[in-house]
Amino acid sequence: MGLRDFKKFKFKKFEKYKYVALIIVIGIALMAIPGNKTSEKDAETISTPQIFDQTIEQKLEEILSRVDGAGTVRVYLQELYGAQTIYQMNTDSDQSDTSVQSKEQCVVISDRDRNERGLVKQVIAAQYQGAIVVCQGADNPIVKLAIAEAVSKATGLGMNKISILKMQ
C-alpha cells in the first residue's frame, strides 16, 4: 500500500460521513444566527416576576363583598410566615485525606441583557395563623357560613381560626 492508496483510503472514509459533517456545520451556523428579537416590553415581562398590586386581603374583601347580604367587608389575615422562595443550589464536595468539605452555591441564570438572578426551585405560599372578617351582614348565619367557607378555601385555615364579626 503506497502513499497514493493511503490518500484514497482516507478520502473514502470521509466520503462515508460527508453528509453528517455537512449537517453539523449547518447546525452550528444556524445557532450563530440571532433569533427573533423581542421588544423591550416583552423582555421586561419575561425577566421580571409579576408583582401583584393587590394583597390577598384586598382580593378577599373584593370577593366577599359580592356575597349576597355581606355588605361592606374588611379582612385581616395574621401570617404565621410569609411566602418563601427556595433557590436551586449546586453542591461541590472536596475530599482530602483528613476531611470532607462541601460548598453550596446558588445556581445563577442570566438573561440576554446579562442580568443575573437565582434559579427558583420552589415558591412556598404564605401560611396564615388566623383571620378576622368584619362585615355588615355578619348577623345572618347563612352569610357568616358562606364567608367563613370562602376564607377557609382561600387561605387554608380551619373554620375554628376564622372570626367573623358584625360591622358597626
Image: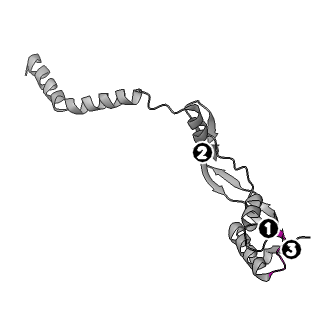
Residue at left 79%, top 62%?
Answer: 79
Q: Quadrant of the N terminus?
A: top left
The region drawn magenta spans 131-140
Total marks placed = 3
Location of residue 154 in the rendering, given as x and y in whole percent from the top left corner: 69, 67
- Residue holding disc 3: 165
Tell me: 50 left or right of 68.
Answer: left
Q: Is residue 108 visible?
A: no
Type of amino acid at the residue the image marks with label 3: Leu
Location of residue 44 in the rendering, given as x and y in whole percent from the top left corner: 61, 37
Which badge, 1 or 2, is on the more N-terminal residue? 2
Is residue 127 on the magenta stretch? Answer: no
Q: CA distance from mark 1 to mark 3?
A: 17 Å
Q: Is residue 21 visible?
A: yes
Tell me: 1 left or right of 46.
Answer: left
Snapshot colouring: one colour
- Residue holding disc 2: 119
Which one is closest to the eye, mark 1 or mark 3? 3
CB under 8 Å between discs 1 and 3: no
Q: Which mark is residue 129?
A: 1
